Image: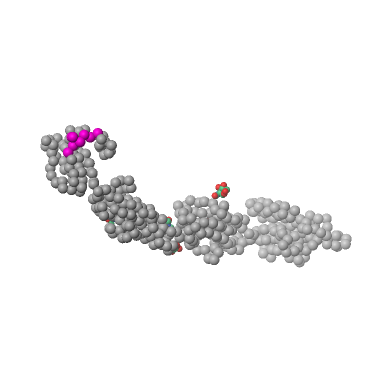
Amino acid sequence: MVSRWIACLIILLAAFVQRHAGLTSHSLHHHGAPYRPLEEGDSKPELVVRVHEEVVLACDSDAQLTWKHNGKTVQRNSVYHLTTDTLRIFRVGPQEEGLWQCEERDPKSKELLATRAVWIVIMDAPKGSYLTAEGKGKVGPWFNIKENTALRIRCVVEGGRPSPSSFEWWLQTPDGELDSLANYSTGNNLQLDKISRQLHNCTVSCSVSHVALPTPLNASTKLNITYSPSFVISRLPGFGFPLYEGMAVSLKCDVDSNPQASHRWMKDDGDPPVPQTKDGFLNFTSISREHIGWYKCSAQHSLGTFASSGYYLNVRLCACFCLLFPLRRRGGSQSESIPPNGLVIMLHKLTIPRRPWLASSLSFLSLSSAMLIGGREQPRGHYHQS
Ligand SMILES: *[C@@H]1O[C@H](CO)[C@@H](O)[C@H](O)[C@H]1NC(C)=O
Ligand SMILES: *[C@@H]1O[C@H](CO)[C@@H](O)[C@H](O)[C@H]1NC(C)=O
Ligand SMILES: *[C@@H]1O[C@H](CO)[C@@H](O)[C@H](O)[C@H]1NC(C)=O
Ligand SMILES: *[C@@H]1O[C@H](CO)[C@@H](O)[C@H](O)[C@H]1NC(C)=O
Ligand SMILES: *[C@@H]1O[C@H](CO)[C@@H](O)[C@H](O)[C@H]1NC(C)=O
């Protein structure tokens, strides 16, 4: 009964707020008749009004009425206008806050039949809002937290009457995308059980709506998530291309962690054979068989020492370069440099397949029409077709 009555009041209040009307009327209903004094824990019917609002309280009754404000009988004057069953307050101010009652008495016996009550609350906009966290107090612009731990934040509103109508929680990514955190919050409490590194640099905000505010009040903090290093190893030429002795090869190690960690290359758990650069490169200008082995990248971090999985660097000893070029017409010449340890196939009287670099094309070549130059001892020189 009482809750239905309160619902009514809220609808009435909402309608009032929307219209910004200057007049609020309110009917006082029987509150626990027969008469008994209100006790602590009784639900308090509240009438929330703006300051300077005109308020009409109605007490529909055939009995003799006495109006009381905070226990004192109300006298008719320039501020309070009394009719048989209404009390009109022309401009409510802070002095009108509190408990308003109409007492119904039997006209003859003057016996108290019932009393009805309403609390007038003057609407007041909150002064501000901020975030707090257990054990950290008021949260600053950055919120430091470890990956995979729980995030618990509370949104605190300073001042304001009545209580805020809603709290909304939002997550904003560094590129401005907005996601609702409604599923992780209840009222002014936010709880994420396991915070992931993907949320690093995201902004968590609490948006407070209040009847006395035209736009919501916001409080926010940016997540600074400490997370352990993760590694990405890349290679130039890319993985899958065979490496031959003499080639220039680069290994690259990228470490992602917060705070940033510096990388350290290792070969077979020792130092690398060539110096590493600051940006994570291990550059081999001419790779050789001594460089074969297991390589990994390690990083020192506040959470400990971490290492990538191992990468086996293999180097093929014979560089079988197949320079597929036909010797030009008799007398014509062309120069090619032969890689160290290279094996060169020179061709003549052949039509080069459309895509000669495809290994499978080689099967179309007749070796009888080719000349092979190979091995370390091959001299530089001029070769021509006779
Ligand atoms: C909240 O949870 C419900 C049910 O699990 C789901 O359907 C909805 O998409 C979730 N909303 C958001 C914003 O994640
Ligand atoms: C996070 O933000 C800081 C400061 O705004 C910036 O220096 C850093 O690069 C950002 N980190 C990531 C991973 O976006
Ligand atoms: C708070 O945030 C909401 C939505 O993100 C926005 O509409 C509103 O204008 C903000 N209020 C202030 C005071 O910045
Ligand atoms: C973010 O957290 C790291 C520790 O993990 C700290 O070194 C750094 O100063 C913090 N950054 C900010 C902006 O608070
Ligand atoms: C190492 O190799 C990479 C890629 O080949 C190159 O971008 C970088 O400048 C090289 N660094 C040094 C110090 O030679």
Query: Can I make out residue 10 in this image?
Result: yes
Answer with the quarter of the image where residue 84 lies: bottom right
Write the start and end of the magenta stretch as one range. Answer: 364-371
Residue 358 location (% of width, % of height) = 28, 38
Foreground residue among 376 and 330: 376
Q: Residue at x 33, y 47 (%)?
A: 239
Residue 249 location (% of width, % of height) = 28, 51
Disc tally is 0
Foreground residue among 129 and 68: 129
> Is residue 199 one of those drawn in magenta?
no
Query: Can I make out residue 59 in this image?
Result: no
Q: Is residue 346 left or right of residue 112?
A: left
Residue 71 location (% of width, % of height) = 76, 66
Answer with the quarter of the image where residue 91 lies: bottom right
185 vs 137: above or below: above
Q: Residue at x 73, y 65 (%)?
A: 70
Foreground residue among 1 and 12: 1
Q: Residue at x 38, y 54 (%)?
A: 309
